[in-house]
Image (cartoon, helix red, strand yellow):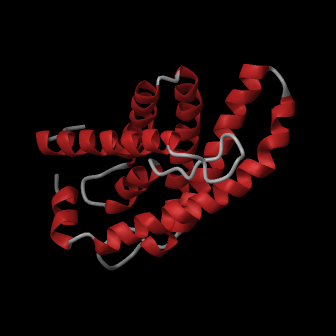
Amino acid sequence: MKITVKKLCIEALFICFAAALSALETLLPPFVPIPGIRVGLGNIVTLFALYAGGKWHVYDAYIIAVLRCFLAALITGSLMSAVYGLAGGVFACSAMIFARFLFPKNKSEFPFDIRFLPFTAVCGAVFHIAGQMLVAILFYGSKYVLAYTPVLLASAIIGGIFTGFLTMLLLRKMPAKLINNIRCS
């Protein structure tokens, strides 16, 4: 795997941007008064890397997802959020990669059809919850934490649709020259 300095810098910016979005989301007041429910704004950057195409590959999305979790945990000062985020991030990234390949390839500007981005994001959000539930079961040693799953799944579906549409808008509205510059790095 050969990486250019330009791509390394762009990937570092993506990681920092994703971590900042994740950390910002923890600092904002909750949208609903239920603990643990977040939209998943940091996932927008991972989705962008998955759908941008060019020289961006699956392992780039994993790097962004994993390092974002660690950096966001450092920013917020929560070690447990790193553990939950890492498990959720790896599960989510794997699910989004699989979901992306389920849909037909695109003949236009992007290698994968971005109309399916909300579905891909929902798959990622649902599997993020699955990863976090697995950590919670291991951490607490009880399967009773699964009682919270329906609430988290409902929020994951709503948050996934939201982040999927935001990523789709970002890809559509960004200047083609900028996207091509990112792709070719």
Height in image: 72 above or below 22?
A: above
Q: Residue drawn 44% across and 38% down?
A: 23
**Residue placed furthest toward the left:** 5
Height in image: 74 above or below 97?
A: above
Q: Answer yes or no: is residue 11 visible.
A: yes
Q: Residue drawn 59% across and 48% down?
A: 38
Q: Is residue 4 left or right of residue 165?
A: left
Decide which of 65, 158 is in the foreground and name it: 158
Image quadrant containing the N terminus: top left
Decide which of 129, 38 is in the foreground and name it: 38
Q: Position of residue 157 (x, y in %)?
A: 66, 60
Corner quadrant of residue 2: top left
Corner quadrant of residue 128: top right
Q: Is residue 19 left or right of residue 148?
A: left
Q: Answer yes or no: is residue 101 visible.
A: no
Q: Is residue 169 left or right of residue 117?
A: left
Height in image: 94 above or below 182?
A: above
Q: Position of residue 61 (x, y in %)?
A: 39, 46
Height in image: 88 above or below 184?
A: above
- Total numbered circles: 0
Q: Position of residue 163 (x, y in %)?
A: 50, 60
Q: Residue drawn 41% across and 46% down?
A: 21
**Residue placed furthest toward the front:** 29
**Residue placed furthest toward the bottom:** 108
Q: Position of residue 142 (x, y in %)?
A: 84, 25
